[in-house]
Amino acid sequence: MKIYYIIGISILVLCLNLVYSKNLSTKPIKLLNSLHDNNGWEILDSSSNNLVSTKEIQERDLFAVMVKKDIELPKKILQNVIMDVNNYKQFLKSSDSFISNEIKRTTHFVDGYQFIPINIP
């Protein structure tokens, strides 16, 4: 089954939003809505099976990065990998200075902090 996955540095933005928001239950909703909105994404690279885009986060000095790729993988396996925030470093080995920490977990979502230093053109 073909599925899309999104790996984004936008998780950092979510964490900052959580830290500076007063109401924990509504903290990431405005940010998530902004990230899910198709408007404002600028395509940096588009090849036969890859798409890399960035989006400026309004009212913040931050950009979100979205990577899309078609893959053949059962949905449950991909979901388990994405939700396993504390073990990201085990399979993202190309970045020596990669940091990943789980901040909060509920039955519906996982909040995590990731820092991956990269050069974006």
Image: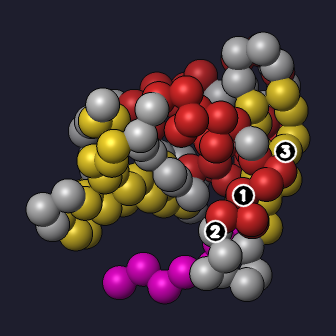
Helix, strand, or loop for circle 2? loop
* Residue appearing at x 86%, y 32% in the figure: 104
Relative to 65, say whether 116 is above or below.
Answer: below
- Locate residue 2 relative to residue 31 in the image: left or right: left
Q: Work out how far the residue at label 1 is from the one at label 2, CA to CA, in angstroms.
A: 6 Å
Going by the numbered disc 1, the residue's amino acid type is Tyr
Residue 65, position as x, y percentages in the image: 44, 58
Q: Is 75 a magenta residue?
A: no
Give yes or no for contact between labels 3 and 1 (Cβ–Cβ under 8 Å): no
Going by the numbered disc 2, the residue's amino acid type is Leu
Residue pushed farthest left? 48
Q: Name the residue under label 2.
A: 92
Going by the numbered disc 3, the residue's amino acid type is Glu
Residue 78, position as x, y percentages in the image: 53, 38
Residue 44, position as x, y percentages in the image: 25, 69
Q: How is the image coloured?
A: secondary structure
Q: Is 117 a magenta residue?
A: yes
Q: Which of the marked residues, 3 or 1, is nearer the chain's N terminus? A: 1
* Residue appearing at x 27%, y 47% in the figure: 70
- Locate residue 29 relative to residue 44 in the image: left or right: right
Q: Mark 1 points at which residue?
A: 88
Q: Main secondary structure of the magenta part?
A: loop
Q: Which mark is residue 102?
A: 3
Relative to 71, say whether 89 is above or below.
Answer: below
Helix, strand, or loop for circle 1? helix
Residue bounds of the magenta highlight? 115-121
